[in-house]
Image (tube, rainbow, N blue to C red):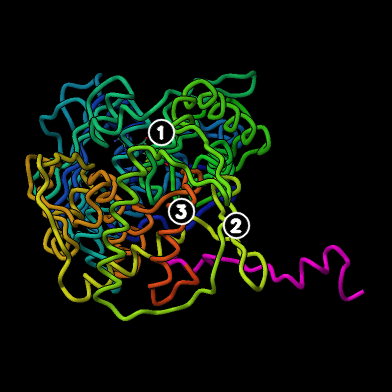
Amino acid sequence: MIKLLDEALVNKIAAGEVIDRPFNVVKELVENSLDAGALRIVVEAGPTFIRVTDDGSGIQKDDLQLAVRSHATSKIESFDDLQHVSTLGFRGEALASIAAVSFLTILSKTTDSYEGNELCLMAGKPISFRTVAAKQGSLIEVRDLFFNTPVRKKFLDMKEDERITSFLEKFALGTKTSVKLILHTKTVLDVNASDLLDRIAQVYGTEVVSELVPVHYENDFLSIKGFVSKPSLVRRDTAMQALFVNGRLVESEEITSALYDAYKSLLFVNKHPIAVLSLQMFDGVDVNVHPTKKIVKFSFPDKIRNAVFDAVRTVFKEEILDFQVQEKYIPTDAAYVRPTVSTQSKRFVKEHQKSLVAQEHNEKKYVHFPEMRILGNIAKTFFLTETEEGLMIIDQHVVEERINYEKFMKQYMNKAVAVQDLLQAELIDFSPAEAMVMRRNLEKMKGYGFFLEEFGENTFRLTRVPVLFNKIKGSELLRDLLVDFKEDEKEDIITMMSCRKSVKAGDVVSVAEMYILLKELDLCELPYTCPHGRPIMVKLPLGDIEKMFRRKGF
Ligand code: ADP
Ligand code: MG
């Protein structure tokens, strides 16, 4: 039964404009369908319409007119209900706000009626109301959104398509209800599996699934379920993070920071894990703090943090060990250069030596560095070298990043990115939203040396790659590239690619390898910072060291 909320309660509800673009319409409508207990939700959208069909409870004939009134809801009645909202909606405003700025049709049928009823409104005013044949559930159709308002984003453009798609991708992971999105008559998302892992595969592609580990956690306050990625599978943005609190898709600083803490040293800068996590708790969560309801407030934020941290960390203790023992740590020192290098390093040395020779022959020499003697490395991250002036500490990762950045930038600017055919084309599955960005950037990808062709729904065939990046798995690099293509920044793109290729903190680098890297770095135009602007090396002058030991200046 839909009722008007009394004024005192209305005043307690966090209000604000919720409908300001087509995306909001989709969000509010699918949330209503889920609240109505739908098992199937279909969203169709085109240039001038949005239609959401569900098989949920439907709306009674007598309630139809009320449903589009402001502050009319069947979901809460009292302030007490507001404290324990279990539905996604509760403000009773969405349909009213949508109705006010569009032509709205609501066609609905409940189980206890043979017929359905259809209400049509224009700018919030009823223009027809009739009985019609209908299936169980509701069909809500919004036409000509914002036809009566001046400056609003009225139509679906590519960006809005992407926004809707990525929202529904996440939304579909928080429920067992089947969710289908048909955009411009094309089915771009169809999630219908009952098992979460299968649903994740339907959304993000099967490739991702093998790198996910399950999370199961419970204490007397809350439970956490879902999947997180091993640190070997990370993303450059948070597009594949979906966090749910009591079924509601939320953004939460508490949950996110605990998640990253759990990965701590296992992630590199600007890397993001994949995470689909669902928190359930009876008490201690306030959903009434933000107009679009995407932010919730926890009464005991520390409890949430600790639980998320424990839940994810436990998984790693059991699962990640094989990831960490990739190569045994072999200590190196100045006098000792590893005589036998691993196959990976052999290739590494060769690759760099070759290009070093080429560069020395062809290019202007920049001489930047004083003579250095490599003393060894610490924490598998920093190299220590001695120069006449003192101690130099060098970040092994950023050295190679700078080198690759300059090499690739040069090729790119000269429109001469060296490419090579892959012996075997790589098939890459994207999520529907990613595939949209990819499709629109295929030509640009070529400019960067990646040749792709469409191969089925959201699958692409990668046939050629830049020579400089031939050792990296195409799918990983391309997903990263997509993030930058959204932003469209050349510098970012190449920085990212250089970063991907480069040795990491934690990779074992021998003194011999480091020596080669430093020589290459010396040929760079800007050898002192990495492309992100972080320093490559830090000098600790002899004078300062002497001061530390109170040998001078006291
Ligand atoms: P709220 O979701 O906050 O209650 P809305 O304006 O979104 O407010 O919807 C008003 C009311 O209309 C809901 O409380 C619900 O009773 C009814 N309603 C809306 N959409 C549906 C739907 N798809 N199926 C069944 N009932 C619906
Ligand atoms: Mg609602």
What's the magenta region? Answer: 530-554
* Residue placed under numbered mark 2 in the picture: 384
* Residue placed under numbered mark 3 in the picture: 270
Q: Name the residue at 14% across, 48% down.
A: 183
Q: Position of residue 499 (x, y in %)?
A: 38, 56
Quarter of the picture holding the N terminus: top left
Q: Name the residue at 13% across, 47% down.
A: 462
Answer with the quarter of the image where residue 317 lies: top right
Q: Secondary structure at mark 2?
A: strand
Is 173 located above or below residue 331 in the figure? Answer: above
Q: Name the residue at 26% across, 30% down.
A: 201
Q: Amino acid at mark 1?
A: Ser
- Residue 358 falls inside the magenta stretch: no
Q: Amino acid at mark 3?
A: Asn
Name, please, the residue furthest toward the right: 554
Q: Nearer the viewer, residue 509 or 506?
A: 509
* Residue placed under numbered mark 1 in the picture: 229
Specify whether 406 is left or right of 51.
right
